[in-house]
Amino acid sequence: MKHNLLEICYLIGSVTFIIGLKMMGNAKTARNGNLIGAVGMTIAILGTIFLVNNIQVVNGFETKVEIPAMIYGMIFGAIALGTVIGWLTAKKVQMTKMPELVSMFNGMGGACAALISIIEFGHSHHEGAAAPATGMMIAIIAGLIIGSISFSGSIIAFLKLNGTMNKPIRLPAYNIINTLIMLSVFGFGAYIVVAGGSMTLAWLLFAAALFYGVMFTVPIGGADMPVVISLLNSFTGLAAAFGGFLYDNKVMLTGGILVGSAGTLLTLVMCKAMNRPLSNVIFGAFGGSSAATGATDVKGSIKDMNTSDVAVLMNYSKKVVIVPGYGLAVAQAQHIIKELENILEERGVEVKYAIHPVAGRMPGHMNVLLAESNVAYEKLVEMDDINPEFEQTDVVLVVGANDVVNPAAKSDPASPIYGMPILEVDRAKNIIVNKRSMNAGYAGIDNLLFYDPKCSMFFGDAKKALTELVAELKTME
């Protein structure tokens, strides 16, 4: 009876995961989808705690093991502690810090998968225990390696995103070194599966996989972090799926497969958006972009525009496209830009938002930021759909975006971002770029757009500058 109830709990959990993931594909239903998935996970956890038959085989006989009340207290105490920490962290985190939070949470998932493998390896090699089946050993070792890589890689990604490690580290023949380390780690794992091993070897494999995770992520430049976050996320899902095989746990398997496949698909989308083959991502042949590696020697003058001129230009436009970037998130200007949208639409101006797949610091960063200020999802237009509209656009307002609008990606073969699909804002009739200064963007290269005759710079903190712009527009009623 208990087994049947447990299977029903796992079925409910699996279905809610699928439904929740589907709902997260739309900004309007994403919140509810997240809650549905959380409810399913809660049901699966409670079912596992109370409905699993605790049977242990001793000398060929099955014996039920009674779990002390103290163990249940420790389990629920750990759940309560984790819930409080996670809840408070998520509530307090700024939108600009969301990518770091995602990296940290993802790393914790990888660490859990690795620790599960370590524990199960110890159980399978305990004195008197029967030799584990090859399939079980493969699941244990694969979960250990992939979970460890995901953990250490995510920690490095976290440090890069918060600025602690803001420069890529490149060694001579880095691709060859990393490939050799990767092959050595997986070869070591294969040896343990085939020849057996001890806890000492398991801990050595754990350390080696952690080291490779660091080496894999360290050389990657900041502009490529959205791809890395997605890839590491897929690693965590894959590690969790191996845990599902290990325990014959359907809900763990389903959740792992969903996370792994979604992360892999998102990685492919990011690679396409940045014009990078997936093989370059996997083997670490990317991320060295900087001004020192082929940035264009830009020559020309820029035009500076004041608040009044920007207001006049936008007030008498028919169509305005806003391009949000990381600077918008840093300034927390999403609410004032929504107010700007409302004022323009009241005066008959058509307003849309152009969204590049890798704008911000993680996939969907700008979508979430604008949804926070109640921008209609229909107004968020993806790159491929908005590019043909720029020629009919009177004004493009670029707020805090840089590399995703840089024409060097189309015109300069020497540029590190050459070939990357961009928002072709240079085709619009007028371009206004709001930035704090002329500093380079995340990729570390100068932007040719700033020297375009149709482009004017609107300097200042995004929130302050847009607040002044809104105030100026209100005086023009």
Image (cartoon, rainbow, N blue to C red):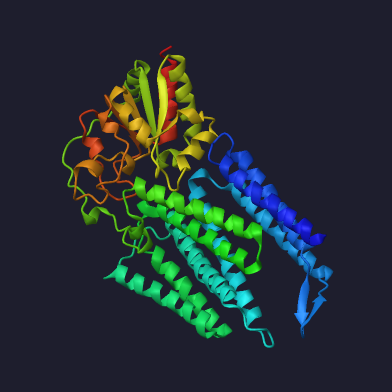
Say above or below: 238 vs 62.
Answer: above
Instruction: Tell me what residue is drawn at x 57 percent, y 76 percent.
Output: 137
Q: Residue at x 57, y 34 (%)?
A: 28
Q: Position of residue 91 (x, y in %)?
A: 61, 46
Q: Foreground residue, 157 or 335?
A: 157
Q: Is residue 471 visible?
A: yes
Q: Is residue 39 left or right of residue 358?
A: right
Front position in the image: 10 or 49: 10
Image location (x, y in percent) of residue 122: 63, 80
State the residue at coordinates (82%, 74%): 64
- The answer to whether residue 167 shows anywhere in this view is no
How many dots with numbers?
0
Q: Is residue 172 above or below residue 404?
A: below
* Residue 319, image quadrant: top left
Q: Position of residue 51 (x, y in %)?
A: 79, 61
In the displayed structure, does residue 237 sit left or right of residue 441? right
Give residue 289's quadrant in the image: bottom left
